[in-house]
Amino acid sequence: MQWFGQAPANIALIKYMGKKDTEKNLAVNPSLSYTLENLFSNVVLEQHHGQKDRWEPLDLPGLPAFRLSDNAIRRFLLHLSYLKEHFKYSGQFIVRSNNNFPQGCGLASSASSFAALTKAACRALSELKHVPCPNDMEQAVLSRHGSGSSCRSFFKPWVIWDEHELEPIDIPYRELIHQVVIISKVEKTISSSEAHKRVETSPLFNGRITRAKQNLQQLLRAFNNGRWEEAFQICWREFTDMHQLFSSASQPFRYLGDESRALLQTVKRFWHDKGDGPLVTMDAGPNVHLLYRKDQKPLCDEFQQHHLVGNYDVL
Ligand code: PMV
């Protein structure tokens, strides 16, 4: 028997950074994300009679081979154990998975992969245990135990996650054009769990919860009042705040290198010249996410033609 789950990634404009409960993955501050329907993970679960669960790549003909680090495999199987325990199931599975985008380089792959695993496992385990399959909200809460940000991938397009509360919200910009400019596909060496711990040692962590809450309220107000440029400024302030927490931790780490900075400057100049431009954000990685309104398609094409083509890979 096989069970399938698929889930999209999401990009936070207000970042989840720092945990108040490391077991349940409860964030210290509320976050706001946009669901990225073009970037997703697939998981297939198959029962097997071995001693342990096992991970394998879900390689599809025509697509590059998919690999996970040993650490990522361990975390993935640990989450499956948590779900099996939740359903009181003692059998074993082969877990096959892939993403349609690079893994572990700040493209929110943990969100989509843990959400896809949770979906596949809820289908499998509810069927095997003859119990009703949990609804989306219940699955999101289960998924949060594996990766906090994955709980936001169960809804679209906009989601606010605040501690135990998870709420899809209505924002006037329902459909955005999303691009990720790839600065590096190298898998990051500091896991997000480690990042959540290290940021607490930064002197800037003091006041972070207030700043994130203020950024969230101001961003919602800017969106609701159609103030796009103000939204751009708030998103910029928010991701640079997170990256400053990284670089000022007692064991500092950095993703914002010369190449990311050069691209950010190009986007800033573009905004200055045109009086318009995309929202910009960065996750825990060097890659740069751009979000345009639908009516900005010509602007998006112009930026791509003049500044990206020939210089960067874009997803
Ligand atoms: O869900 P985690 O533990 O992989 O944390 C991800 C946190 C960020 O991606 C850096 C920010 C966010 O809100 O998604």
Image: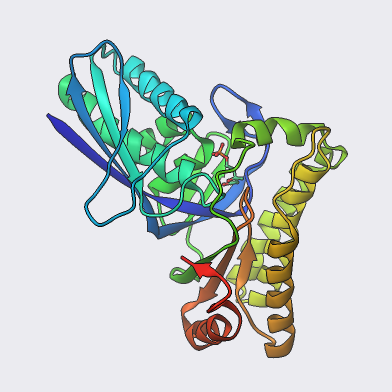
Q: Is residue 278 above or below residue 96?
A: below
Q: Residue at x 64, y 36 (%)?
A: 190
Q: Residue furthest left?
A: 1
Q: Is residue 128 left or right of residue 28?
A: left
Residue under the image location 44 percent in, 51 percent down: 9
- Type of colouring: rainbow
Q: Nearer the viewer, residue 44 or 138?
A: 44
In the rendered image, which quarter is residue 246 located in? top right
Quadrant for ligand 1?
top right
Q: State the residue at coordinates (27%, 45%).
A: 59
Q: How many marks?
A: 0
Res 131 seen here: no
Q: Residue at x 80, y 45 (%)?
A: 247
State the image coordinates of residue 143 (x, y, percent, origin top left): 42, 33
Left or right, residue 249 beside residue 169: right
Question: Is residue 91 left or right of 166 when viewed as pictured?
Answer: left
Please provide percent x and percent y for residue 209. 74, 42
The N terminus sits in image quarter: top left
- The answer to which image quadrant residue 38 occupies is bottom left
Residues 4 and 14: in front is 4
Q: Residue 305 location in percent, x, y?
A: 53, 85
Query: Is 137 on the left-hand or right-hand side of 31?
Result: left
Is residue 74 visible in the rendered image? The answer is: yes
Q: Of residues 193 and 237, which is closer to you in this image?
A: 193
**Rendered position, 88 above or below 133:** above
Q: Nearer the viewer, residue 216 or 261?
A: 261
Q: Is residue 182 above or below residue 272?
A: above
- Image coordinates for residue 265, horizontal then vertical, percent: 74, 73
